[in-house]
Amino acid sequence: MNGHQIAPATGTTTRIETIRAALPMSRLGAPSSLPRFRWQQPMPDRDTPPARGLTAEESAHGFDWGKDSILPYGVYADYDRSQQPGEMPLLRLTNGRIEIDIAPQYGGRLVRMYDRRLKRDLVFHNPVFQPANLAALNAWFSGGIEWNGLIPGHTPFTCAPVFAGVIETERGPVLRIYEFDRITEATWQVDLFLPNDDDRLFVHGRIVNAAATAKRAYWWTNIAVAMSDGMRVIAPADYAIEHVLPGNELARFPFPDPQRFDGSYPGNWQSATSVFYRKPDAPRLYIAALDHDGVGLAQTATAEMRGRKMFYFGEASGGQHWMEFLARPGDARYIEIQSGITPTQNQRFELAPESELHWTEAYGALSVDAASAHAADYATAERATADALNQRFPADELAEVDGWLTAQSRRPLDKRLSDGAPWGSRQERLTGRDLAAGLDFAVGHAKDCWDDLVGKGAFSTANLETVPTTFAVSDVWVAALEQSGQSHGTWLHDLLLGIAALDREEAAEARDLFARSASARPTWLALRQLALVADTGDQKERFYMQASAAADAPDELAVEIAQFLLADGRLETLTAFVAALPKAAAAQERILLARASIAARCGDWNELERLLATEFATIREGEMLTVTLWTALQKGRLEAELGRPATKEVLAERMRQNPLPQHLDFQMLADEAGV
């Protein structure tokens, strides 16, 4: 076997230990108790134009971002920017050469990979924990290596605990991270193997579809790397596919593009960009982020991973602010190098019935002759990087490790280190079949109505006295609800079945079920659901106000009501509603933004300016609300001074004199600002 030998150990042996890392941490609240439907997605619902110049492979199983439901998951929107002193519990793999830290409470994210010989972090090690609104479930944080599956976008577990544990093997310990995805209804796991006396990490991925039906799934591994001046991202590429904003378009272009600039250098991109490197006939795929000296992190994998991508927030002010917003000024610039099962991120792949998908990734520092790595001819840099990578990660060695890790992937844990959600266990009990060999989903938790349904086929008196905070909408769970309702029908059956019907966009059936539930017991949630399906604005307002009057209505309901009133132009009602809110609800960020919108529409420029001094935590990626409000403030003050409407030219000059403050700048394109 060429290159590094995996076993036997010749130096320090690998061990796994639990640690607590001290760092500033912002508060992450619990997931929302409001079921969010397709039209309420935190991710914009946007059509994807027909792609230009893509092959059949690059178009297979394509999808439009924001079109899919995120139920039964709840969004994480109750976080702040407090960054108080805190501790993050971590699992550390170390062998004296590499230190790798995993955060099981946050999706199993690999948050740190420190190379002792190079005395540097190989991945971007975020110095703070700061959620922000960039994921399918809203809250997301930057840094490290994120395991993204099985639905498009950042994993629904990015801010949630997952299962983790250790397998003891003849080659040393393997750290396993795993969970059950409730939308695809399949399992995912990653097994991390740091060989004894080695400075390379091997990661084995496994997805299991235990169902008798085919599924479509998604997987991309996102690797954050600290950005440095002159950095180049190299991967096999005859051409590239760019995810073009704001039109949400995929377009093929030469790579590097002689008509624009060398896109392999992230620093050349002004706007945020996603670039997929494409060379379908390459003998081996990889991606490497190399600094000015030709040194950096490389990733390669077995042939199942066909996609490679670079993402960068861009050099413009909005992108630079995003990176600082997610970390801290002066220690925030990073890029992402990514690897996926499909050629682009606008695609899923098919899981056959009762099947498993396996792959193995390899990570480590890579050194390439600087002159070759930065050759003007990209093909020269690509060949030099491939030669160095083949020496560093020999293909036959990767294949051998892949076979060994595949065999280990079905072994049960020797020790559990972290618990995930109870839904995997519930799914197994409901269907009467194991989800995946070697994966144990048993976990202690407070029993709720779904445990009643699985265990007894009926809801207990205790669970009929509370409004549910979690939901299930898939076919197997709907069938169980319907069967239970035939003999033990209650207001809760109607409410939960109505939510599932509305998720299927069967509004008429949902309306009948919500009305029946509210008639039996007018819970705040049933009334909120009636507001969602009401035909007129007056009906919506009436149901919303009834829901908000309930003693147990959550504060987050006020945000939804305020957004409805604002969008429907009910400013008088909105003003009175916001003024009457209790202190906790009134302090929510989106209520402050609603008040700012009221001030802008009413011409209360002092109030608008005061509210815009807030450092907001939950502004969405690509959201332009703060830009709109700042522009309204400048235009309003200018026209008050002039005593007449401002011309476009005069307003443009005012905006140049009063540019958008950095704390309000979340633009993703270099030229988004304007009047």
Image (cartoon, rainbow, N blue to C red):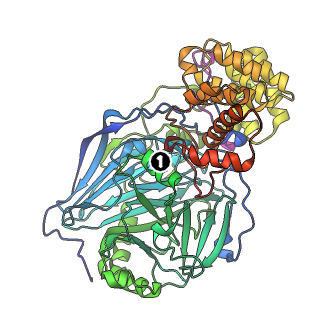
- Residue 648 can be seen in this image: yes
Q: Main secondary structure of the magenta part?
A: loop
Amino acid bearing label 1: Glu
Residue at 72% from the left image edge and 36% from the top image edge: 500
Q: Where is residue 369 in the image (x, y as percent from the top left)?
A: 30, 82
Q: Mark 1 points at which residue?
A: 179
- Using residue 541 as the reference point, say whether residue 70 is left or right of it: left
Residue in front for this viewpoint, 648 or 272: 648
Q: Where is residue 75 in the image (x, y as percent from the top left)?
A: 57, 37
Q: In this view, does 295 lie above or below 140?
A: below
Q: Nearer the viewer, residue 434 or 53?
A: 53
Q: Residue at x 40, y 35 (%)?
A: 26
- Determine the residue located farthest toward the front in the rendered image: 642
Residue 516 versus residue 347: which sits nearer the camera? 347
Q: In the picture, residue 476 is in which quadrant?
A: top right
Name the outermost residue toward the left. 11
- Kindly state the secondary structure of the residue where label 1 is placed: strand
* Image height of 46 relative to 202, above or below: above
Q: How many residues crowd around disc 1 within 10 Å: few (fewer than 14), some, or many (20 or more)? A: many
Q: What stretch is highlighted in magenta?
A: 459-476
- Measuring from the top left, give residue 464's x and y in whole percent: 63, 17
Q: Is residue 471 magenta?
A: yes
Q: Residue 522: horizontal and vertical position, in percent?
A: 73, 15
Horizontal side of 6 relative to 504 (left or right) equals left
How many marks are shown on the rendered structure? 1
